[in-house]
Image (tube, rainbow, N blue to C red):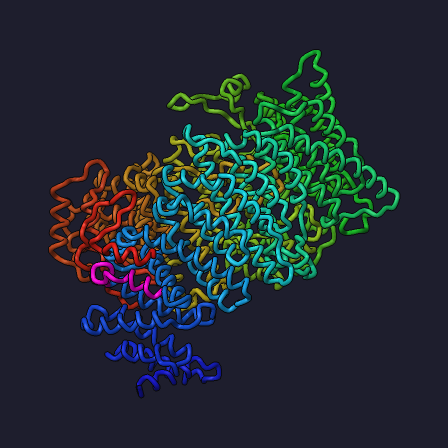
Amino acid sequence: EALAAELASAVDLIMHPMTQQQARLEAYMACERFKEESPMCAQVGLFLASSPQSNQQVRHFGLQLIEYTIKFRWNCITHEEKVYIKDNAIKMLNVGVGPAEDRSLLPTKDALSRIIVEMIKREWPQQWSDLLPELSQACTKGEAQTELVLLVFLRLVEDVALLQTIESNQRRKDMYQALNNNMNDIFEFFLRLVEQHVNAFRETTRLCNFTKANAHSRVVEMVLLTLSGFVEWVSIQHIMSSNGKLMHFLCILLNDKAFQCNAAECLAQITNRKGQTKERKPLLQLFNEEPLRYIYQASQIPADTSSTLTVEQHHNFLKKLLQVLNGMAQQLVALWGKDDATQRPVHLEVLLECLLLLVQHPSLSVSHGSALIWQLLLKHEPCSKDFAMVNYIPKLIHTIAPRIVKLPYPASTSSPASLSTEAYIRLEYDSEEEFALYFFRCRTDFLEIFRLATLVQPLVTYGYCEQWLQQRLRNAQAEADAEVKSGNVSCSVLDPVYLEWDALVSVLDGVLSRILLVAERPSVPAGLRLLEECLKLETINPLTYSILLSCISALFVFLSMSACQITATNCVAMSGVSLLPRVLDKTFRALVMKPPNPLEKVQVKSAKNLRRHAASLLVKLAHKYPLLLLPVFEQINGHVELLLKEPGQHQLCRLMRTTLQEALILISNHFCDFERQTLFIEHIVQDKRAEWLAFGDALKSPLDFMSFVGLDKPPIFAVEGAPTLQNRSRLLDALHVVLGVVKRCTWPDDPERAQRGGFVIGCTELGNPICRNPATKHVVPLLSHVLSLMRVLNELFAPEALQALSEGYRGIHGMMENEKKLLMGICALPTDPLDTTIRSEPTAFEKMQTFMMMVTEGCYHLMGSAGPSLGRDLYQLMGLSDAIVTNVFSRMDLVPDYRLRPIIRVFFKPFVYSCPPSFYDSVLVPLFAHLAPLMCERLTRRWIYIASLYESGQLNGEVNDTQEVLEDQLNRTLTREYLDVLKIALVGGQIGADHVAAGANANSNSVAMENEEHSMDSAPQSRASQSALLSDIVSDLGGKLLRNGLIGNYVLMTLLKAIAWNDGMCSMKAVNIAAPVMRFLAAEKLMDENKAVTAFTAVLQGMQVHGQHEANQSGLVTLSVQFYELLRPQFSILTEVLQHIPSVNAADIQKFDEKIAVAPVKGNKVDRAKKDIFKKLTAQLVGRSVNQLFRHEVQIANLPPMQSHKAKGAVGTTADIMDSNQNASLAR
């Protein structure tokens, strides 16, 4: 008692808020010492837990002491002690902890249930055959005891089936089998409790005995919660037993406000079950009329607006109900049409009506959840074509369309009782940013409904768009007239008129993007009339004009459809042809539109956005419909020429001018006439040739360049026409013109047209035509200047150049904020490109930083695109490799990681990928000879530095925005991207969507780098990558690189080090490349003893660092066994390497050696038995996950095997484990 009193006061001291930190720590350590060392742990625990004088915290601590004894000492205490603990625990269960309705006692109730579960895990069923009768007996004592019994079942099923946290697999199987053997009775027991306590709850509520009603309510809640743990995994027969009684109960309870949330939770677990068809089919019973009616009624129960809490509870219920409906829809689309037996549900309309009403709900979450279910049904062919669905599509799109209009985050706190959309937004989202991200996702899914509906009923969706657009155009004409009269032009993207336009354009674009995929298309004349109406609307508002351009872009598809119908008498086609010049006129007028009030900044910005939009639209049309624009090429070219002659007058910025030229190049690709196209390219490039020559002096040294662009002068706003400002503009212009030509100019895809047009100049060894690019002879002479610029950009990091920076430009070479966010994976908020308020006026420093970024990225993109674009003409240039080494790779020791990344990824990766085999020796081998040693040493140095940061504690989980975290992420990303280049070079591979799609980027305004990290998103070790690990072979280029002593050694060293660098993704990439490389080196006799030992040691180090991760371990084990098989016959020293593994068994090494010797490798397959022995050998080497470190080992001893049983009927009950009386007592 004295000991218990001492511990009780220590617990009180720990829990008291005013206790001093030191005193709390001492009390805590005293409690921990007692728990770990005292043999009286369980007895004192029982005394504390059952003493009436103990408060809640002390009782809870007492229960923890008992749990500790069971978990960590059960195998070493006597049988008498076990019986004593078990009897007292059951006694506490029978007495109860406190009233069922008292939720403040939940931690204590949970702790008591845990004690019983921990004993069950060690004794049941073999040595505790009367457990279920004892639990059943406890339930007869009252609601408090029933709640505890249900908690026991819930915690047990979590450990055995759901989370599978039991340390002994054999014991888990025993209990799983025992639960299954008794499942009939367990389910009968649960159903009886539901029925009994729901009725009791209703009766006591009627009699106004609310305390008793709360107790019954808590039991029902607990049964439903426990059932949720079972229904996910038990056989469907138990769920459907007694003619689907459980699902019937749950559907009824959906309409009972007291239990609807828990009932929906349980029903959602049932409807979202996975498995075979026969396990799913019974769930279609939910599509019978009665269950559907209950679900429909539940969805229409009005919310109780008496308090915020009740509104929130009802809202949560609807979200859970949507999970039920989503599961039902998943089951329906999985089963409908699979066989003759599973056909259309008779009462499908009830489900569709329910979903339609939920889409109309003011809460975005509910509406969005319902829209996702509509998507599921529309994607399923039999369902989408069903007559009921066809009837509901018009109603659906009328409901969804208003939802696409952007909503601002509500400024004031609306009362949730108002049940408005604004009130729900405030209820769910704490910040504008959080809501903006969610709304963007909602809008995307709402628009997807329109796209899917168009594939089913194109005339309905198009008709809706047509009516909406006609109505908007009528209103717009009146608005435009009013703006002209008043001179008041609103350029705000928050203007309700603009928001409606924006939604309309999104819907129109979504619908018309699918129109060519369907057979039943809208009438072309009607589409052309709509296009004509858009062309007729005249407005002085830049924002409205921009929206009109988007409408024209979407409707342009009708021009292409009409062009396909051109005949001498076809007036539709002719009207299409006559509209084209008007479309171009509208676009070009946008390019020269001046703001109504040149003194108003918002209008000036809006007009600039419009001009940018018009230029982008031309590129988009030239990319999508080049053949349509080809006949009017001369007119377009004439317009562009006029604009380029007087750019200042039309306020066309440099990027827009380049964009317009790119549009022309895209159309000129369809001349199919080499001479005509090359003359056109010459016309574009000729002005810039003189410019590049003029830059010669500025590109001699970094100091000359800095003086040229103004980096050596203070950052002040230069007036228009200032020399340094003009220099920067001229340089970017010259660079972007060449980049545009290289990126956009190409030869015809069709070999016959290429042949006829004079593009083909020969054939490869395999007989494929070799085409020449019309731009080559104009671009190649300029490449030396571009390379000089790239050299200077690297040399800017030299100490003397950094010293020469003016004070205000000291940090000019730092990473920009958006680059940091991109690297760290911070999600950018979705914004409207026409919003003039997004960006504040940049400072002189920011302008210079943007200029430096655009020049740098422009250079790497240009040289990266040159390989794929110019082809052989580039690679056959004399001295190309030397020029790249002395310019692009110049002073790479000084270049920071974030500037090295684009050199590797944006330039070098596509350059290597596109190199024709005949130039491997002259171009790529010298480049790798320079780069491989440099990258190996650099990455090694960086990883050592990052490791030191981890060891010193500067990099831990607490910080995520420091320079060190940024450096760590940069280093990982750079390593992964360099390994991607090595993979392409050594074994070949796909270049990734970022480079393939570069030419297809319609919005050529952005010469920005591609979106983040395609290379980083590689999946864990899948079956495909496992087979690649075994079957990949070294390519021709890889052979040349690996046979070169210097390159081969550095590449091998990089791969082997990367296996053990502290990045799981890097390790996986390196493992996948190292396997074929090692097979090649062994086959070519390029291995020596030193390399063999280094390679094998590196893989073992990889096991030490990454072995605890399953995805990494499988690749490392395969690689290790393969290395050993390949190298052990020649290098017996590898056995000594294995002997250095801590606590390794010599007999196991002997056994592994024998296994390798007896069964030589067949093909590249690795024997599972060898892998298993190797895993055993390296078990001590493998690191442990952080969650496994410093934890007490829980030991659960296996019990004698359970007697096998034969299943009786559908589900077996066994007399071996429980006799029939015991079973009956549970379900009584």
Q: Is residue 556 above or below residue 1157?
A: above
Q: Visible in this render: residue 442?
A: yes
Identify the residue at image location x=48%, y=62%. Answer: 217
User: Could you tell me residue 572's position as x and y percent?
Assistant: 71, 18
Query: Residue 359's image quarter?
Result: top right
User: Is 135 situated left or right of 1214 in this image?
Assistant: right
User: Is 679 situated left or right of 871 in this image?
Assistant: right
Q: Is residue 840 above or below residue 872?
A: below
**Highlighted magenta segment, given as a residue range:** 123-139
Q: Nearer the viewer, residue 984 or 1180?
A: 1180
User: Could you tell me residue 1196's position as x and y percent?
Assistant: 23, 63
Locate the C terminus and report the quarter of the image it occupies.
Answer: bottom left
User: Is 431 situated left or right of 871 in this image?
Assistant: right
User: Could you tell me residue 755's position as x and y percent?
Assistant: 51, 18
Identify the residue at image location x=84%, y=43%. Answer: 483
Q: Nearer the viewer, residue 1221 or 157?
A: 1221
Q: Is residue 219 above or below residue 324?
A: below
Q: Visible in this render: residue 876?
A: no
Is 870 contained in the magenta span?
A: no
Farthest-out residue, bottom: 2
Is 129 contained in the magenta span?
A: yes
Query: Residue 1087's image quarter?
Result: top left
